[in-house]
């Protein structure tokens, strides 16, 4: 016998189910008055530093239809590349930027939308700079454990080419699934759960 | 959301999180839970040792909480009224895999009413709505990771999957720990419920011990006599590595 490591196992994930909105965005689903507003709806204010952008898209299932009942959360650095988090040890992030957003897909179109700012670059573990990116987390009925992916920016070709995470993707044809094309100040990031265009998901 | 208000005097941790045990969690594809069939990625995930983008996460201060946020019996009820159903306290701790309490974790819950009906426009079960029950609540864990809320015990309900599938009584939990990589949604079940082992969603979890880990224990010592019974439900988030011996560049 040896000593025990005394570790616990992570609580097993379960699907968020079709009524995730009740818990996470009750005002969105006609349960007013419990919370003053839904968390994560406003990431920026008038004083937030950085270029305003809109990130929009849909999550698409294996039959080509959008998920109308999913919920997306995003997390990103501020314009200077700092996170608004106690675990950020490199400096103080912009206090007028939360870095975190939560958005339910539209019940008819399946479209999600975040009004945010373009993040600065953040170092990889070895100090090399990663390209600007936004971390995504997707939950829904039929998704047993939240899916993690990243959105990169279509107008950052040079930075994307040297990004250490994108470089890790062996099947080079799949890199484009993470890059959102730009149209004005809007970036469109469609997330495909299956098929030829299946988005790269990360085991973080 | 509040900005940057630490909930603890401890120095924030910056280590990466323990790898997720994907054989412990349910697989993405579980055909007996039919909705997974078209919603499960089919290609291998790319493993990514945490960077700052995954290690960090937002902080939620107690100032976001309203007085009744942790009381589902009253937070949607008309003044002087309360939700119908067996009154219960749900309490426990948010821990990580090292057994440490996780302070400042945002816990959001949602559930059906005592008849098994959700307050949602897509819900069509014939059990009636309770005009005094909304079905959502939230709280933030204390210094030792402890939390509690008050609610009514939800009912089981049928759902369209197999011809006669029923969900066991359950409460949905969403937990925000200290890093975005710790993000977790799960469900709490109730001790002794025979419906647990018949449920296709529960059975997506491959290991019986993991299901038992989602089953809250009745705790008669924590009841409020003549008011509410109590169920104890601990939640475990991913642990994180110590940065004590982290690789450093030469000369640092």
Image (cartoon, coloured by chain):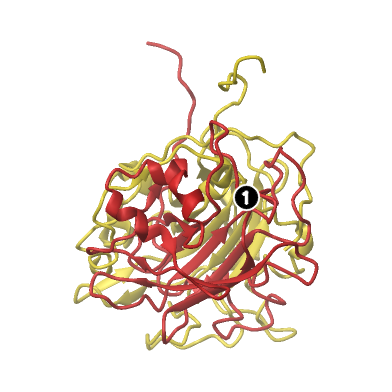
Chain colours: A red, B yellow
Residue B114 versus residue A160: which sits nearer the camera?
A: A160
Residue neighbourhood size for the residue with mark 1, other residues' Cα within 10 Å, grouped as few (<14), some (14–19), many (≥20)? many
Query: Which image quarter holds the C terminus of chain B?
Result: top right
Residue B216 versus residue B22: which sits nearer the camera?
A: B22
Chain of the residue where label 1 is placed in the rendered structure: B
Quadrant in the rendering for residue A184? bottom right
Residue A156 versus residue A9: which sits nearer the camera?
A: A156
Q: Is residue A204 visible?
A: no
Query: Which image quarter holds the N terminus of chain B?
Result: bottom right
Quadrant in the rendering for residue B199? bottom left
The tally of labels here is 1
Residue extending furthest front? A158
x, y (%) of residue B65? 74, 65
Q: Is residue B148 visible?
A: yes
Compared to residue B65, the image places residue B124 above or below, namely below
Q: Residue at x 42, y 40 (%)?
A: B48
Compared to residue B70, the image places residue B96 above or below, namely above
Compared to residue B26, the image places residue A29 above or below, namely below
Q: Residue at x 23, y 58 (%)?
A: B30
Q: Residue at x 75, y 34 (%)?
A: B10
Q: Residue at x 59, y 68 (%)?
A: B151
x, y (%) of residue A153? 50, 60
x, y (%) of residue B190? 44, 57
Q: Which residue is mark 1?
A: B57
Residue A107 versus residue B54: which sits nearer the camera?
A: B54
Q: In the picture provided, is B165 more to the left or to the right than B21?
A: left
Q: In the picture provided, is B224 more to the left or to the right than B45?
A: right
């Amino acid at each position: 016998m040896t000593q025990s490591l005394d570790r616990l196992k992570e609580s097993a994930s379960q699907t968020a189910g079709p009524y995730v909105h009740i818990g996470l965005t009750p005002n969105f689903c006609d349960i007013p008055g419990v919370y003053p507003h839904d968390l994560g709806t406003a990431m920026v204010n008038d004083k937030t530093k950085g270029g305003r952008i809109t990130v929009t898209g849909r999550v698409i299932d294996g039959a080509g239809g959008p998920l109308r009942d999913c919920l997306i959360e995003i997390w990103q650095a501020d314009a200077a590349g700092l996170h608004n988090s106690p675990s950020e040890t490199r400096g103080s992030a912009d206090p007028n930027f939360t870095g975190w957003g939560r958005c339910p897909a539209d019940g008819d179109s399946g479209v999600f939308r975040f009004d945010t700012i373009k993040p600065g670059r953040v170092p990889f573990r070895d100090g090399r700079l990663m390209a600007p990116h936004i971390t995504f987390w997707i939950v829904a009925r039929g998704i047993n454990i939240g899916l993690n992916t990243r959105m990169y920016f279509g107008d950052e070709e040079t930075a994307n080419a040297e990004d250490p995470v994108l470089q890790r993707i062996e099947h080079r044809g799949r890199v484009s699934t993470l890059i959102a094309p730009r149209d004005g100040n809007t970036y469109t990031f469609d997330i495909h759960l299956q098929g030829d265009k299946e988005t790269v998901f990360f085991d973080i | 959301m509040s900005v940057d208000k630490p909930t603890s005097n401890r120095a924030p941790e910056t280590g990466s999180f323990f790898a997720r045990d994907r054989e412990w969690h349910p697989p993405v594809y579980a055909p007996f839970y039919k909705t997974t069939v078209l919603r499960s990625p089919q290609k291998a995930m790319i493993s990514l040792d945490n960077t700052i983008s995954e290690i960090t996460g937002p902080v939620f201060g107690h100032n976001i909480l309203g007085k009744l946020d942790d009381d589902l019996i009253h937070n949607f009820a008309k003044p002087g009224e309360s939700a119908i159903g067996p009154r219960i306290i749900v309490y426990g701790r948010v821990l990580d895999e090292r057994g440490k309490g996780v302070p400042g974790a945002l816990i959001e819950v949602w559930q059906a009413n005592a008849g098994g009906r959700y307050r949602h426009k897509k819900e069509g079960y014939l059990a009636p709505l309770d005009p005094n029950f909304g079905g959502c609540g939230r709280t933030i864990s204390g210094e030792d990771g402890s939390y509690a809320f008050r609610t009514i015990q939800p009912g089981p309900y049928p759902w369209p999957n197999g011809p006669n599938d029923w969900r066991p009584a359950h409460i949905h939990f969403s937990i925000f720990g200290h890093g975005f990589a710790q993000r977790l949604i799960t469900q709490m079940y109730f001790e002794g419920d025979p419906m647990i082992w018949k449920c296709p969603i529960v059975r997506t979890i491959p290991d019986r011990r993991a299901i038992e880990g989602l089953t809250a224990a009745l705790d008669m010592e924590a009841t409020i006599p003549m008011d509410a019974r109590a169920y104890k439900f601990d939640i475990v988030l991913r642990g994180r590595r110590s940065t004590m011996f982290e690789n450093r560049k030469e000369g640092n």
